[in-house]
Amino acid sequence: MKLLKLIFRNTGRHKLRSSLTILGLAIAVMAFSVIRYSIDAWYSGVAASSPNRLITRNAISIIFTLPLSYRDKIARIDGVTGVSWAQWFGGIYVDAKNFFPQIAVDKDTFFDMYPEYIVPTDEMKAFLSERNAALVGRKLADRFGWSVGDPIRLTGTIYPGEWDFVIRGIYTGAKETTDETQWFFRYDYLDERMRKETPVRAGQVGWFIIWINDPSQAAIISEKIDRLFDNSMAETKTETEEAFNLSFVSMASSIIIGLRIISILVIGIILLVLANTMAMTARERVPEYAVMKTLGFRPVHIVGLIFGESLFIAILGGLLGIVITLFPVMPLVRTALGHFFPTFPLSVVTLILGMSSAIVVGFLAAVFPTFKAVKTPIVDGLRVID
Amino acid sequence: MAETLVKLEDVSKSYWRDSIEIPVLHHINLEILTGEFVALMGPSGSGKTTLLNLIAGIDRPSQGRVIFEHEDLSTLSEGDLARWRSRHIGFVFQFYNLMPVLTAFENVELPLLLTKLSRAERHKQVETALAIVGLADRMKHYPNQLSGGQEQRVAIARAIVTDPDLILADEPTGDLDKQSAEEIMDLLAQLNKDFGKTITMVTHDPRAAEHARVIHRLDKGELETA
């Protein structure tokens, strides 16, 4: 503790070098945090999953539909207390780049399954009473400047044609992880038009949402549902909502693995930068360490000086990295990536990981210079002066 | 009759460069008595500094023993030797070797950080040491704000602040102008005379050596007493 003053002063000896190293560390911690943030965002849908919800989809792929008639059979299975359904719409609003999820849902049951979507009572009433009504998330409404009552036209891709809607409500999320970027409209509006224009596509849904009161029964109930439709024209695959959402994340697994590797590389690179700084520092101070040893300072003190300086630089860099992550960078990232990721939760774990990485880097960077400084005989160190 | 403080018995020292042995000191026998002011003189490469380093316990002899107050230094581990140096030795270097980021006060305080003295006690001792070397008014100055002579005074204050048994000085005037060198030598002589400090100094400057009471000459690693 008595040598703290020397550690702090030494850090300030080469101001430019120390500042650049601290800045480099800060940028690395910021990059690491943003990458980890992005990975968290991929998993945000998984985090928002409810253990009480099961999802039943076509066993071949999510892009194949299931007959709506499965609903009653599923509802009769022991343990199932509610069934709803939904269908992906895939329309374009003005331009294809304005992507957002559009989902046709059963007006009477869907929102009972998702209590985290909070809709004002009068707006829900309006949604229920108007066939082409839409309920949109708060972030989505803010993105396009929509408000209740706005007429919106979407151009169908999976369901061709022009589709006219009226926004009748704006929902908000009960939790931070709730997705507020979705567009919900009534399944009966979609199905009615299919019956008129493409009857073969009527009465088909993308997936069923099944409510169970006892999550511990999820595996048994899932198996019962799937067995029910064995050898049918549309066999099913039932899984928990978490597993269902994870299956989407797994589609991007290579990207996520790539991001994880980059995040580790970023830390690796800055480790080399700090190690280089500490090696230069220790090499320059060989005579000083020799003088200190002559005065009676032991290797433990030299270890303390070098590790102390390295950790001090690393901690300063880490803290600065967190500050620039939280303030100027994250709002920019949220703006840039907000359309791609429905929620962007700030994870304390990510920040702790970033800070911990900086500390580990500070520690590792000091190992080699310390070893050299301690092992250099005093007379050799003093000879450097001569 | 003064007691023997340091005794070198048949001390030899060689260095190895690759596989070539370079002998530096040959069978040195030397006694330094308590209260003596000894000068080690000799031309460059005669082994003066090596001898001083062996006495200081910062190097070990290839052969023979260095005995300090009946304690054989070769029996001490590196850690024990470091503790021994902090208690018994004050070292003055040719190029002062002050920590540039510390003030004169903090530089002098440095050896005291290894003791169990309280902050107040440390401050008192540092002030005393700086007053003895005549730099009480330069305590807050950094080394780059001092002249060479003043820096060496601070280094001497650092060497005496722990009240060591032996002060070792390696060419203490080697980097100073004539007037500053004279002042430093007067200071060392005063420490020996007024404070009874045992001093061993390496120098090749005959004027500096005049201040010593005993002069030993080294030539090609062999000792002769003047």
Image (cartoon, rainbow, N blue to C red):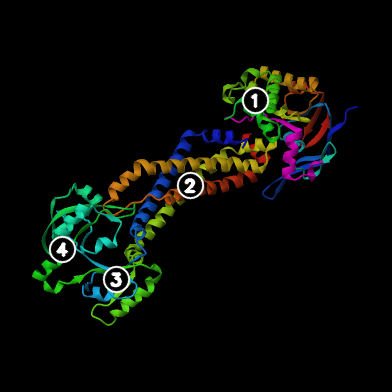
Quadrant in which the C terminus of chain A is drawn = top right
Give the residue type at disc 1.
Asp
Residue B175 numbered mark, or none: 1
Q: Which residue is mark 2?
A: A358
Residue at image location 31% in from the left, 73% down from the top: A237
Q: Chain of mark 1?
A: B
Dot 3 amino acid type:
Thr
Q: Which residues are magenta?
A: B72-100
Above or below for A284 versus A184: above
Image-quadrant location for residue A208: bottom left
Q: Which mark is residue A56?
A: 3
Place of residue A13 in the rendered image (x, y in percent of width and height, measured from the top left): 52, 33
Magenta stretch contains residue B85: yes
* Residue B87 place in picture, x, y as percent: 75, 34
Residue B180: percent from left, percent from top: 67, 19
Q: Residues within 10 Å of mark 3 (few under 14, many from 20)?
A: many
Q: Quadrant of the N terminus of chain A?
A: top right
Labels 1, 4: front one: 4
Is label 3 in a helix, a strand or a loop?
strand
Q: Are marks 3 and 2 on the same chain?
A: yes
- Answer whether residue B7 is visible to the viewer in this image: yes
Residues at discs 1 and 4 both on one chain:
no
* Chain where mark 2 sits: A
Q: Report the front residue among A332 and A179.
A: A179
Estimate the spatial distance between the alpha carbons at disc 2 and disc 1, rounded to whole Å.
44 Å
